[in-house]
Amino acid sequence: MKAANKIENIYTVRSYETDFLQQIRPSSVLGLFQEIAGDHSQEMGLGFQKLGEQGRFWVLSKIYVSVDRKPKSGEKVRVATWPHTPNKAIYERSFAVYDAAGERLLGAESRWCILEKSGRIVPCSRIEQPEIDFIGERALAEVDWQIAPVENKGEPHFALTVANSEYDLNRHVNNIKYADYIFNCFTVRELEERRLRSYQLHYVKQAFEGDRLEFFREEKAPGVFSIEGVRNGAETVVLAQVCFA
């Protein structure tokens, strides 16, 4: 039986998912994407339980989110997602968020892979692929996946030591948590005075309980910031870019 090539769910933005402006936090957007992608993967026969029985799990490697408007607390939104034809070891997936009138608020492109428990990437050829009619159209026509690293780090703009509340079911820092860390590199005033245009995250390495994470930012062009998260003063775990209008 063919799996649906696209699914949509209606969500209400809860107050605990919003920031001091009562607008949805970037991490909450990633949470919605993670939830609906998990639902669709389950329908496709590639859900967490089935992969877990094989000693495998999904990992988000890159995501790019374009922002037209951030929904507010109490607002109902329609979230849609659809996957694209897999390529070697990469599974690409589009997302779109619409308001009650059907106006698109956010669009996103993402890249995922399946890992063994050892951390080794599993090629798509070794995975039983679902029977599905993949959609070629993408939520975003063009995505520049290049992010310049932070060259002049200086003092970190935000730092923390990883504890259990940062973990996901794979026992490392949840991918969506990094969005909070990235935006903690900006002050309340900066976020009040600027309009967010896009943000993207590249996940480089996993972080675990007890790791010290430090985040450095650098403005590469007016309103365009690179942010780099470093583990224990040595390894980059995440590289991000935040663009303001």
Image (cartoon, rainbow, N blue to C red):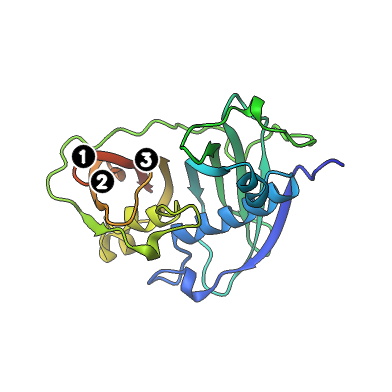
Q: Residue at x 37, y 40 (%)?
A: 205
Asked which secondary structure carries label 1, the reply is loop
Q: Are marks 2 and 1 in contact (CB under 8 Å)?
A: yes
Is 101 positioned to the left or the right of 1 in the image? left
Q: Are marks 3 and 1 in contact (CB under 8 Å)?
A: no
Q: Which mark is residue 98?
A: none
Q: Residue at x 25, y 62 (%)?
A: 187
Quick one: 18 or 196, which is closer to the camera?
18
Q: Position of residue 208 (x, y in %)?
A: 34, 52
Q: Residue at x 73, y 44 (%)?
A: 45
Q: Position of residue 176 (x, y in %)?
A: 45, 55
Q: Is residue 153 visible?
A: yes
Q: Residue at x 73, y 35 (%)?
A: 135
Q: Splitting the image into 4 quarters, where does residue 133 fall?
A: top right
Q: From the image, tell me which residue sits under label 2.
A: 231
Q: Position of residue 72 (x, y in %)?
A: 52, 69
Q: From the image, tell me which residue sits under label 1.
A: 234
Above or below residue 203? Residue 146 is above
Q: Which mark is residue 205?
A: 3
Is 24 positioned to the left or the right of 221 in the image? right
Residue located farthest toward the left when viewing the structure as drawn: 154
Q: Amino acid at mark 3?
A: Lys
Count residues near mark 3 (Cα–Cα under 10 Å), then give few for <14, some for 14-19, many for 20+.
few
Q: Amino acid at mark 2?
A: Arg
Q: Position of residue 87 (x, y in %)?
A: 61, 25
Q: Amino acid at mark 1?
A: Ala
Label 3 to label 2, Cα distance in Å?
A: 9 Å
